[in-house]
Image (cartoon, rainbow, N blue to C red):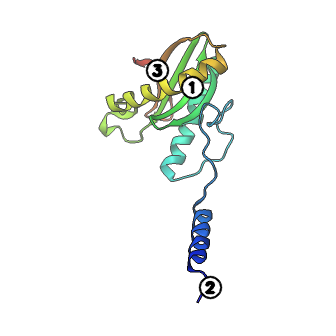
Amino acid sequence: MPADPYETARQAQRRAVIRRQRPPRRSGPTAGRTGAAGDEPPAGSPTQRQGHEAEVRAARHLQARGVRILANNLRCRAGEIDLAARAGDLLLFIEVRERRNPSFGGAAASVNRAKQARLIRAAHHFLPRLVRLHFGGAAPACRFDVVAFDTDQPHWIRDAFRA
C-alpha cells in the first residue's frame, strides 16, 4: 500500500495529463500551406485524400490563369476556406468541390446555403489577417468562387455567391 494515497492520485493525474497532451494546433492564415499547394503529403481517409488532390489541382488551375494563392486550408470554428487567393486587387475565397457521381446535382450544386453561410463566417474570421498580410492593411473587394470537378476538368465559377 502506498504511503500517501493523495500523492499516488496526483502522480496518476499527471501521467493522464501527459498522455492526453497533443501538439498545439496551428491557426490563422499561416496554418494552411501557403504558396504552392500540395507541399505536404495527404493524410486521412480516402475521401480526405481525394479532396486534398482536388484542392491541389484547383490551385494549379488557378495559378495557370494568373491567380496568386495566398493560403489554403484555413480552418476556424466557423468553417474552412479551401483556398484564399489574390487576383489583381481582389481577394478570392475559393471553395473546391469534387463529385464523381452527378446524381445529386454535381459538385457546384453541393455548395448549398448552409455551406455558403459557413464560408462567409470563416471569411469574416480570416479577412483582417489576410488584409494585413497581403494587402498592406487596405481592405480589398472580396469574392467567393467555386472550383467544381464533376469530371477531371475543373469548372471555375467566379462570383458563385455573395455575402
Name the residue located 47 percent from the left edge and 22 percent from the top edge: 145
Which numbered disc, 1 or 2, marks the residue that appears first in the sequence? 2
Q: Which amino acid, mark 1?
A: Ala
x%, y% of residue 90? 56, 12
158, above or below 119, in the image: above
22, above or below 54, in the image: below
Tell me, yes or no, if residue 44 can be seen here.
yes
Q: Which amino acid, mark 3?
A: Phe
Q: How far apart are marks 3 and 1 (CA)?
A: 10 Å
Which numbered disc, 3 or 1, marks the residue that appears first in the sequence? 1
The residue beneath circle 1 is: 84
The residue beneath circle 3 is: 144
Q: Distance between the residues labelled 1 and 2?
A: 59 Å
Instruction: Kindly identify which numbered label has been placed on residue 3.
Output: 2
130, above or below 103, in the image: above
x%, y% of residue 148? 45, 30
Q: 81 or 13: nearer the eye?
A: 13
Tell me, yes or no, if residue 108 can be seen here.
no
Name the residue located 62 percent from the left edge and 41 percent from the top edge: 26
Label 1 CA crowd tier, 10 Å (few <14, some 14–19, many 20+): many
Answer with left or right where residue 65 lies relative to residue 148: right
| Label 3 residue SS | strand
Q: In which quarter of the image is residue 129?
A: top right
Q: Distance between the residues labelled 2 and 3?
A: 65 Å
Q: Quadrant of residue 7?
A: bottom right
Q: Which residue lies furthest to the left in this view?
A: 104
Q: 144 or 148: nearer the eye?
A: 144
Which numbered disc, 2 or 3, marks the residue that appears first in the sequence? 2
Label 3 CA crowd tier, 10 Å (few <14, some 14–19, many 20+): many
Name the residue located 68 percent from the left edge and 31 percent from the top edge: 36
| Label 1 residue SS | strand
**Quadrant in the picture for the C terminus:** top left
